[in-house]
Every structure is written in C-alpha cells, then in structure tokens.
Amino acid sequence: MKKTIIAALIAQGCAGAAWAGDEGVFSLGEIRVTAAPMSQVAPGSASIDAAEIREHDKVTVGDALEMAPGVNLSKVGARNEQMVYVRGFDLRQVPVYIDGIPVYVPYDGYVDLGRFTTFDLSRIDVAKGFSSMIYGANTLGGAINLVSRRPTKAFEGEVGGGATFTSRGEHNGTQGYANVGSRQKDWYVQAGLSWVNEDYFRLPGGFSRTPGEDGGKRDNSRHEDTKGSLKLAYTPNATDEYAISFVSQHGVKDVPPYAGTAPGVTPRYWKWPAWDKEAVYFLSNTRIGAHTLRVRAYHDSFENSLSAYDDATYTVQKKKSSFNSWYSDYTNGAGIEGDFVLGSANLLKAAYNIKQDIHREHNAGEPWRLFKDLTQSLALEDTHTFSNRLSLVTGLSYDRRQTQEAQDYNATTKVVSDFARDSGFAFNGQAGLFYKLGETAKLHATVARKSRFPTIKDRYSYRMGSAIPNAGLEMEKANHYEVGYSQLLGGRHLFEANVFHSDITNLIQSVRIAPTVCSTPPCSQMQNVGKATANGIELGLRGDLASLDYTANYTYLNRENRSDPNVRLTDTPRHKLFAGATWRIAGGWSSTASVEAMSSRYSSTDGLQRASGFAVANLKGGYRFAGGTRIEAGVRNLFDRLYAYTEGFPEPGRTWFVQFNAPL
C-alpha cells in the first residue's frame, strides 16, 4: 500500500474500504450500492486492488481473498479446491462474478478459486450481506466480483514471471504473465495471458508418516493453469461505452490423497485431466439525458473431466468407486439496468436479470443426462440523499427459479427417466442508513433479507450412490444486521470496525437416513432442516509511517447450529488475523512481510476431524530499477510450519521464490 492510497482516502473523505488507482479499472464491470456520502465500495464491504494483490504475491483469487476482513480461505481437500467463506457463508451462498457476469458452475453452484489467477484483474470486490440487488438471485450472503482492467494510455503493458523452489532447493514451479492495452480516442483494447505450473510441493519437516502419505514430496499434487483474456471496447463519447470480452482458462489438477489419521476416512485417488472455463460477454453503458441504460449479455461454459482410480498407482479402475466422468455445462444470460435520476436527491436503479443453466453429465458406458434451470430476478434499488451527511438506500427484488429439465438414470435397468420438476420464488429486501460524522468519520447501519435457491447438485445428486435426491428442496433464507464505523486518524491511518449478525433459516444440510435405501451406505439426503446464526466483529487498520506502509485486519466469527448443536458447522475459524507491511528502503530497495493466523476449525460435522490453528509468515525483498523493472526473492511459510485448512490435507512447507516484473 503506497502513500497515494492514503492521500486518496483523505480526498474521498474516508471512503470505507476504498483504494486508489481506479483509473485502470473496467468500470462497466462494477456493481455497487450507490450510497452518498460514501464513495466506491459501501461500508462493510471490502475491496482488494491489483497493487495489494501483487505486493503480497497472491496468485489465485482464493489466496487474495484471504487478505480481506470477514473472509476466510477454506480448502475442499478431497477435491483439491480453493473455497472461501464470507462471514460464514460459502461460495454457493456468495456467488462469484467476472465484471458482473455470474461464472459459478451451474451444477455445483460454486467454482474452484484455485483455478482463477489474478494477473489480469484490477480489483476484487466483496459485498457482504448488504449487497446490491442488481447482482440478481442467490446472493444469500453477498457477492464476489472480479473486476478486469481498462487501459489509460495509448500503449501500456507489463511482463512478469518467476520460479519456486522447495526447502531442498528443487525447482518445482514456474509462472509467467503478460498484460497489454491501448487507449485510443474512441476505442480501446486490453489483453492478458498467464501460465502457472507446479509439479509438486514438499510437506513441512514436522509432518509424520501416515497410511496415506509417507512425507517429502506430496503425492499427486501437480497442477497447471493457463488463462487468456481479451477486451475490445468502443467509447464514442465521455459517457457511453460498449465492450465485448472473452476469458478462457484451462486447468489440469491432481488431488493429493487424505493424509490424516481419522478413523473411517477413505483416501480418494482422483485426477482432473481438464477443468476448463470460458466466457464471452457484452457490456454497455448509454447515457440518455440524465439517465443511464446498461446492458449485459453473456455465454459462460464449463468443461470438466474427472478420473477416479483404485489406488495410488493411478493406473487401475476396477473397483466400484473408480470411474471416468465428464461434465459439459453452460449458462446463457442477460441483464438490463436503468439508472434514473429522480431529482437532485434521488437515484433509482431498476434491473431485470435472466439466466438459463444447463448441466450435462455422464460416466463412461452411460448415456448423457440433461438438467436445465431458468432463473429470473427483478430488482429495484433506491438511494435518497437527505443532506451531504445522510443518505438512505433501500432495495427490493423478486427472484424465481424453474426446473425445465432433470433426468435420472437407473444403472440397473439402463433407463433414463425424469425427476419431478419444481419451481420456487423469493422476495428480498434491504435498507441502509449512511451518516458522515464530521470530515473524517462515518457511521452506517444496514439490514437485509436475502435468499438462495438450491443447486442442481443439492436437489438431484446421488453422490456416488451414498445419497438420495430431494427435488423438493426449498430455498435458504437469511436476515442480516450490521452496524459499522470508520475514521481517518491523524490523516494517515484508516480505522474500520463492523459488528454483524445473521439469522439463517431453511439451511440445507446433509441428513443421515436409513442405510438400506442407498447402494453405498451410509446414506444421506439434503434437507431443509437447518437454522443457524453467525455473529462477528471485523476490525481493520491501515496507513503509513514514514517509509513503512502497513495493513492489518482481525475477524471474530461465531457460527451456531440452532437446529442441532451436535452437528458442527465446518470450515470457519473463530479467529482470523492478516497483517502485512512494506518497508520502502532508500535507493529502490524494499521489503515486504506478512502473517496469516487462524484458530482451529472443524472439518467434519461430527467433530471427529479438526484442523488445528496456525500462523504462517512470509517474507520477501526486492529492488526496483529506474525504468520500473522490479526483481524480488522471498520465502513463503518462513518457519516451515505444519498446517492445514482441512484435516488430513497439509499445506506446502517452506517454499522459496524468485520473480520479476517489467513494464513494456
């Protein structure tokens, strides 16, 4: 974080969670609550810009989000997926968008954030609880928006790359990226390309041999990800903009087997030969008098192949648990939004969103099955400014989901039939008061009622023979309450505090049922039996002290299962801390240090699997030449700590790296 950030905060009157450098942000891709006198991101939300992501070397979106208050990284170890929880809500309840376009997988309702690299992003916005109604349906706990870049010069660009090494000096990974852009009088173009590869990682020295892992090089831990993006836009005047974008990412990942000691947990021997996602979308902004019309249209596709093997040789597929499976999914959608200026003190937004999700799947030797969902949302969001100190934001939406196709397959009779089709609707609403206290402090209070429709997987998955589908699942609902305060201290230090509470009803949980009804017991079914609460506090402080720039935030989160206290809510620590600082040494030299600390968390609902708390430190140093080229070297997991986000799936030990970045 540079001094320009602090200067910008002063100029904006202590805007909550806002960052400088927005000139390079693709503003068409933003979806925000307009809440004067606040600017940029509504208080209680968070934003992480490209400079901060690069400063702390966050290669994936999951890693970057770990820096945000109220957000904790989680790992679905048995699938080797990066997930996050936002104030206790998972990615099915906090969907992911690219430039306002939903990109979550139609079947699962979430994405693997470890497959999304950050090199071509300008910023990541996180809305929590009180999120804009313009996003559309399923924002039960908020929304995550990955905002791309927009060039500001006739020609601009950068190239970068690096290599990683294990604690024994073995070269185990490589990365490279390039971004170029050109801004002309009435058009611009932006392109990016990145590649990340890791052959394996080494476990920390403190790891003890288990039945599923002998230590040293982590078994089956390779991954490779390639991403390309291209944006072409027409800007006929100062207010109008028309852009078409294309994003393509191709992933190959292996799944390290379970390396814990909990009884009854069976290792999986899985590989994903393909995890590919592509999106093409059109965005526009047209000024009509004092009003604005925005249009979004998109096609997003997901191709996936999974191979499950008998054992750690990854060559034999004779057991009942072994298979080859393919997904071929896509989403078509569109949205239209009007911003209407109703006098000098009132702005009304109206939006309609529609999307059709198509999921197609089959295992080797079986026919394809087809699933279709149609989701629509009609939303209103109004901002009334009472004075230069006080504003009120209210919002309403009506969401509807219809099952258009859902096919079942009986492996015994070899017959494809239809599941029962269902539909559902929800009304959502929210209100927020935003008040400016003097010139350097602000106060806000919000309340929101949100919902989420169950995914195709929630309703129709047999979960490899261990579950019974439930086509009649109802939507989850949540009430959110929040108060927050922010103040600029001494003109150089921004302090923020938020207190929040959420009540969740109809929480979808896996419920154990009679084992005789499944082909592979024990047997379960997804049901609406859950009531839960989430309470917490977020504290943040950032600023600069002469040549030292710093940022720190702490989150306290307490989740309770009100339906059955004996069933644990998993994957969220009660305490989480992130702190980082950069020392700008004279002569182009600098050094950056950070620490990420979390308390323990449960990895299974029965409490038998529990990941211990940990603290991991990172350190690097670098030199920036007069022309802007920067070279750096550093170490992650400095003290070679043994830690895990999910019990039985330990993270990499001490890892060294060298890297460079050069402007074009």
Image (spheres, rainbow, N blue to C red):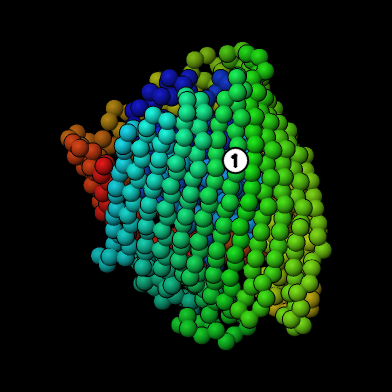
Q: Residue at x 41, y 68 (%)?
A: 222
Q: Which residue is rendered at x = 51% and y = 25% of the image?
A: 239
Q: Report whether residue 407 is seen.
A: yes
Q: Do we see residue 498 in this rendering?
A: no
> At 63% from the left edge and 26% from the top edge, which residue is drawn?
339
The answer to whether 416 appears left or right of 3 in the picture is right
| Position in image of residue 630 (x %, y %) | 24, 43
Q: Report helix, strand or loop for mark 1.
A: strand
The C terminus is located in which quarter?
Answer: top left
Q: Dot 1, crowdedness within 10 Å: few (<14), some or many (≥20)?
A: many
Decide if residue 60 is on the left or right side of residue 44. left
Q: Where in the figure is residue 238, as x and y percent of width and height?
A: 47, 24
User: How many numbered markers are drawn?
Assistant: 1
According to the image, label 1 marks what residue? 296
Image location (x, y in percent) of residue 315: 48, 83
Report the side of 77 relative to 562 (left or right).
Answer: left
Most foreground residue, 168 or 296 = 296
Camera-side residue of 438 and 352? 352
Can you say whether 241 is above or below 458 in the image? above
Can you give x and y, in whole percent of width and height, for residue 47 in the image? 49, 37
